[in-house]
Image (spheres, rainbow, N blue to C red):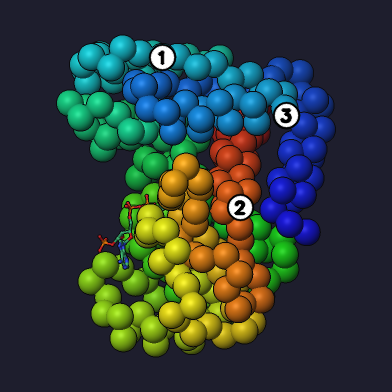
Amino acid sequence: MNIKEYVALRKEELKKEISSYKRLPQFVIMQVNDDPASNVYIKGKLKDAAEVGINCELRKFDIDISEEELIRQIEIINNDPSVDGLIVQMPLPKHISEDNIKLAVSPKKDVDGFHPLSKLDPCTPKGIINYLKFLKVDLVGKNAVVIGRSNIVGKPMARLLLKESCNVTVLHSKTTRKDMEMYISNADIIVVAVGRAEFLNETFTYKKEAIVVDVGINRVDGHLVGDAKSGLPVQLQTPVPGGVGLITRLTLLDNLMEIFRNEI
Ligand code: NAP
């Protein structure tokens, strides 16, 4: 089953579940930017929520809003019992600390799973694990290589793969080309999240039964391109677009529903 079909199936399941509750889940997206990519992501989130029957409200703020005032607005939502979940859309204007804002969102409402005390995992790595499990990929004892070590993708991805008993190696910008080649050629699962178009390409060798999960979203000549060149000689490669981006959006709904189920 491809990712589009998987996401459609899971959304149907969520829709059915939500229709069985007396009240609808409610979440708020706060936007403090005028970023075209953010507008696209938010539009997608609103569409997904509407499709499964979740009430989602977009609250837009002036980009000149102070950090203190934004935190005050977050606290209003934190304390509003009618709101189950909250997302503050990144990036934020330079005068506002993203770290402070991530900490201001109550861990109980943190749909993104960014707060250190949040019980939820960040959506991209969590969704990737769920998809691999849905495909019945045997993860135990497999060599997993994560390329990229960001706080929202690479690090939590490595942690979750380790939880599934993979042998995990994390590579990054300081990894030598020689080591990169060695680890990639021995990998059963490769998750690439570096933000460089076609970083993984035919100049590396791969196990033919390897699985490549492409997290990257790069804009090249007006097109979206992944961190992996399409058509690598492996067993399975997730596409871009129509791959991990869809999984991430689905997992946002999953995280919100986890909060909602605990509430009711
Ligand atoms: P990020 O914070 O910029 O981190 C990039 C990571 O890649 C860093 O750890 C960096 O290493 C590493 N890196 C950069 N150049 C490298 C190189 N030449 N060789 C090896 N490692 C290198 O990015 P991110 O937030 O994790 O996102 C990564 C990509 O995924 C972006 O394209 C982003 O748009 C995309 N993304 C997609 C989704 C989705 O839903 N599909 C979600 C999140 C992100 P150092 O730490 O050494 O600098």
Q: Nearer the viewer, residue 132 or 200?
A: 200
The type of residue carrying mark 2 is Gly
Q: Does the residue labelled 2 lie within 8 Å of ligand 1?
A: yes
Give the image quadrant in which the ligand numbered 1 is located. bottom left
Q: Nearer the viewer, residue 209 or 11?
A: 209
SS at mark 2 in the image: loop
In front: mark 2 or mark 3? 2
Relative placement, left or right, of 189 versus 137 is left
Give the residue at mark 2. 243
The type of residue carrying mark 3 is Val
Label 1 vs 2, first from the N-terminus: 1
Q: Reply above or below: 189 against 109.
A: below
Residue 52: image tag: 3
- Report the Cα–Cα distance between label 1 and label 3: 23 Å
The type of residue carrying mark 1 is Lys
What residue is drawn where x is 72% and y is 24%? 53
Where does residue 169 sit, x and y in percent of width and height?
39, 76
What residue is drawn where x is 76% and y is 42%? 8
Label 1 vs 3, first from the N-terminus: 3
Give the residue at mark 1. 60
